[in-house]
Amino acid sequence: MQPRSRRRMLFIAGFAAYFVVLWVLWPTMVIYPLKIFVVFLHELSHAMAGALTGGRVESITLSPQQGGATYIAGGSRFLALSAGYLGSLVWGLLLLRAAGARGRIPRATLAALACILLIATVFLVRSGFGVVFGILFGLTLLFASRRLPPNGVVVVLTILGLTSALYALFDIRDDILMRPGAPSDANMLAQLTGIPTVVWGVAWTVVALIACGYTLRRLYARV
């Protein structure tokens, strides 16, 4: 077997193995910090969309029950609501692309992510649980960016990226497609636009699958 073919097989096997592990351990405390991390990215994406459309971000809250809320005055409510699930997906795909980059990009990306979390925690998060989590997780990532060897940094970015991208799909399925009447971003968009919740869920799922497929294809081609 050619070295490149072997690397590609290992890439596919590694992705499949992580997906299985994530699926099996999803309800356990092992994955819990990663879930809260993705919820943080979800809420941060709401905040960024609100700020970029002229709104003022008042606060972000995170709860131990894997919930969160972002309070924005002004801005585009449509874009802010749309940015949650798709935002955490984009964060995940960008982290995966950075993990596959060469040179100092992976380490710089992990350090930048840590700083973003810490700054957002200090200036935006207003729940006790969220503040504690944001500071601890941000400092952990900052420590990892400085102390881990290059391969370790890549592994951390890959885990964070895959979890964020896959969590977006799981979340859309659970919150929207399985429980269309439950409170969610899509439910609020349905009230805003008159387009049913399930339609938003299906549309976001299609976008997520296409984006994930494209990113994984690009990474596979570079192996």
Image (cartoon, grey):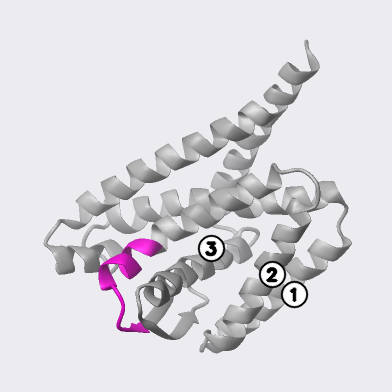
Name the kind of residue labelled 3 in the image: Val
Answer with mark 1 or mark 3, whichever residue precedes in sequence.
Answer: 3
| Contact (Cβ within 8 Å) of mark 1 with mark 3 | no
Q: Is residue 25 visible?
A: no
Q: Quick one: which residue is furthest to the left in this view?
A: 194
Q: Residues within 10 Å of mark 3 (few under 14, many from 20)?
A: many
Q: Residues within 10 Å of mark 1 (few under 14, many from 20)?
A: some
- x, y percent for residue 96: 62, 47
Q: Residues within 10 Å of mark 2 (few under 14, many from 20)?
A: many
Instruction: Calculate the distance from the C-alpha at mark 1 to the C-alpha at mark 3.
Output: 16 Å
- x, y percent for residue 79: 31, 66
Q: Residue at x 63, y 36 (%)?
A: 15
Q: Nearer the viewer, residue 56 or 39?
A: 56
- 176 sits left or right of 215 in the view: left
Give the magenta range. 72-83
| Contact (Cβ within 8 Å) of mark 2 with mark 1 | yes
Measured along the vertical axis of the image, is residue 11 above or below residue 105?
above
The numbered disc on residue 139 is 1
Q: Residue at x 63, y 80 (%)?
A: 119
Name the kind of residue labelled 2 in the image: Ala
- x, y percent for residue 103: 80, 47
> Under tag 3, what secondary structure?
helix
Which residue in the protein does label 2 denote? Answer: 114
In which quadrant will I find the N terminus? top right
- 79 sits left or right of 27 in the view: left
**185 part of magenta stretch:** no
